[in-house]
Image (cartoon, grey):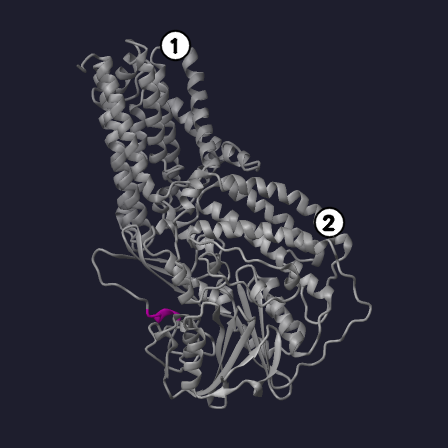
Amino acid sequence: MNYISIKNNQTISLSDIPESNYEWFYDMNLDLVLGHTERHCVNYFGYKVGNNVKLICCIADDSTHEILVSTCLVHKAHALESFCTQLLCFEKFEREIHENFGINFIDHPWLKPVRYAFNRDDMSQTMDNYPFYSIDSEELHEVGVGPIHAGIIEPGHFRFICNGEQILHLEIQLGYQHRGIEQLFIEKKKLLQRATLAEDIAGDTVIGHSTTFAHVWESLCGFEASRDIEFARTLALELERMAVHVSDLSGACTDIAYQLGSSVFGRLRTPIINFLQEWCGNRLGKGCIRPGHNQYPFTPALADRLRQVLDIFEPEYNEMAGKLFKLSSALSRFERTGVVSNADAISIGAVGMTARMTNLNRDIRSSHPFSLYSELNHFPILKRHGDVYSRVQIRKKEIEQSLNYIRKLIAEVPAQPLQTDKLKTPRPNSFCLSLVEGWRGEICHCALTDEKGELMHYKIKDPSFHNWMALALSVRNNEISDFPICNKSFNLSYSGHDL
Amino acid sequence: MLSFLLIILAAAFFTGIIIRTKSIASGRKGPGLFQPIKDVIRLFKKGTVYSETSSFVFRIAPTIYFSSVFVAMLVVPFGQSKGLISFNGDFIFFAYVLGLGKFFSIIGAMDTGSSFEGMGASREALYSMFAEPAFFILMGSLALLTGHTSFQEIFATLHLGSSITYALGGLAALVFLMIAMIENSRMPLDDPKTHLELTMVHEVMILDNSGFDLGLILTAGYLKFAIYGAIIFNLFSGTISYGYAIPMFLVVQAFLAFVVGMIESFMARFRMNHNAQFIVVLSSVSLLIFFGALLVSGKFI
């Protein structure tokens, strides 16, 4: 077969990735994913090589814990056959390639702009002339929401086509947050600048993205992270997961106008993020994770402090969660609202919580373990119904799971090694892929270096990239007044998508 | 005259109590009792911004809305003392003068041309439409029972016959409380605190109003609550002397505000399509009162 199989966080030579022509590449990747729910595409992107574009496709296999990487060289002038005719989950990737390089895909159903990258191929496509799907009808009406929203959230435009109160179709137009992060990774030459950039990909997944970047960089430099470094990362990831999940529960309560839940969960997030501040000086964990060294070693004193915080947190959390999940008026809003079926989740390539709520087992912590997760023996929490209730329940269960993991982790704080390795320069002509399960889902960073060992291309995929489509599907045939609770229950990132 | 003064007094603290109750229930200190009034005074001092797409309808709507509520307030009696306006059939006048105000607030919202406000207007119209039969069946039954057709006479003579009328009064109080919730867009039908346009009913209709106009609409809202509180109190106060009735009135109003605050703190709001079902239930409770009235007055075989 014309692919190379690698492990998570493994660096390989660019020349080791077997190159084939597009027909081979197409048939092979189709064969790999079609009918195999344990395999999904974690990244599929292109980069310029002279006048040509080199496509790299990375398929993760959850059962063998391998990532199958293949590549092919194409030219802009030739239209390519679209994966979407058989595999819809490539839809977003192909749109992105189309937007960035102007490559046309034959039979692609929805070849619309993704994020209006500043260096896109066709500059005539702008926010103002986005080709919205519309229905010509006297009975139906359109409702446009955003890009400026009533709450303190990021910008994005939602266009509903409704029949009275019922939503028939939702189209989401993003790109307002585009900052050109991927390009900045290449332009900024200092490691600190790049690490800070990684933190700014999505403000609510600071630790997720900075950990992924750290893994990519260390792997490129051939650096073996010591146990205390990986310990800090695992702990920080779980703390972040807890904090965001709790605040999402608060958000869900706000959207169904359950004031008690909204204020209690809102308050419960504070001790967790305040602890992050005690540890690393920032409530969102900025500066906590850096490639190559342990910026803020986790000491036994901090462990004691965290234990105290959790001892207060846990009973209060359990009491409030118990109340919320017994409150009939809340359950009547959660249940059977915003359903995404398992088949839909597979076809759009959903990841993270969005996949797990439909009984689709996608969790990098168990399928491609990194840091200390292989020791934690992680079992993903799965729900079957795919409704708001499933999403809220997953959050509740994952908070409990994270609590356990954190207690397990801090029972044994690893000591600081006396001698630490220095970070070398990255290997030239290499490719590295790193997967991390952030609180929202799988985060994928890919880095390519040139012959001097400089970054040549950096590709980021936030879990929101695919999951936005799940939101659009979930609200169909629901009432438009249930949109906010559906949206909150996914809590997707605008800036993570727009980069 | 007495009811006029008392309703204005009650309106001054009613919303403050709701907000304070909610704040304390969620562990916050909350604003002062008169903060809503201070907000309105601040708004009255401000100028108004009008959208270019709106016409004169949008400009006159808030004033008509406020005056309709104000006139409706004049009809409400207090125990034995009549309201400033009182005539036979004044409860029909009461309902439709409020209806007129609502009509203008609805077309005022539609006038802005915003899809949100159109949705809010359609919801508001639907809910008022469902609530109307409940009000008329209820008031009609009370008129049938007492043989009078003005608010003051109905309330003054309601409890002269048997004590079963107190049971009917209890049911009627429930219906009026719920109508008050619908008319004022409170929980569980609407969430006055929400910032989400798509889920709003009343709030979304006034998104474009600002300054003085917004102040008028908010004041009308405060008055409305106190008006319904006064009607509920009237159901029981027919023969009580003023010395007791006036303090009791204030206590009942404060209690109602407290109940509203507690409901809003400890439950989630209904799904939008359950609202209509819920409102229709009120009509059936009114029918129950109707049969009760028939039984009491011996008109039922």
Picture coordinates of residue B44, whole percent (x, y): 42, 40
Q: In the displayed structure, would residue B199 be above or below residue A227?
A: above
Per the image, the residue denoted by label 1 is: B241
Task: Name the residue type under label 1.
Answer: Ser
Name the one closer to the observer, A3 or A91: A3
Q: Is residue A481 toward the left or the right of residue A416 in the image?
A: left
Q: Is residue B120 toward the left or the right of residue A95 in the image?
A: left
Name the one closer to the observer, A450 or A365: A365
Q: Secondary structure at mark 2?
A: helix
Q: Secondary structure at mark 1?
A: loop
Name the chain under label 2. Answer: A
Per the image, the residue denoted by label 2 is: A305
Closer to us: mark 1 or mark 2? 2
Q: Does A130 appear in magenta?
A: yes
Q: Which residue is located at x 36 percent, y 74 percent? A: A86
Picture coordinates of residue A253, whole percent (x, y): 48, 45
Picture coordinates of residue A343, whole percent (x, y): 39, 62
Res A273 visible? no
Task: Name the residue type under label 2.
Answer: Arg
Distance Cα–Cα, label 1 vs label 2:
65 Å
Q: Which residues are magenta?
A: A127-131
Q: Which quadrant of the structure image shows residue A417?
A: bottom right
Dot 1: within a 10 Å radius of its alpha carbon, few (fewer than 14), some, or many (20 or more) residues? Answer: few
Res A426 visible? yes
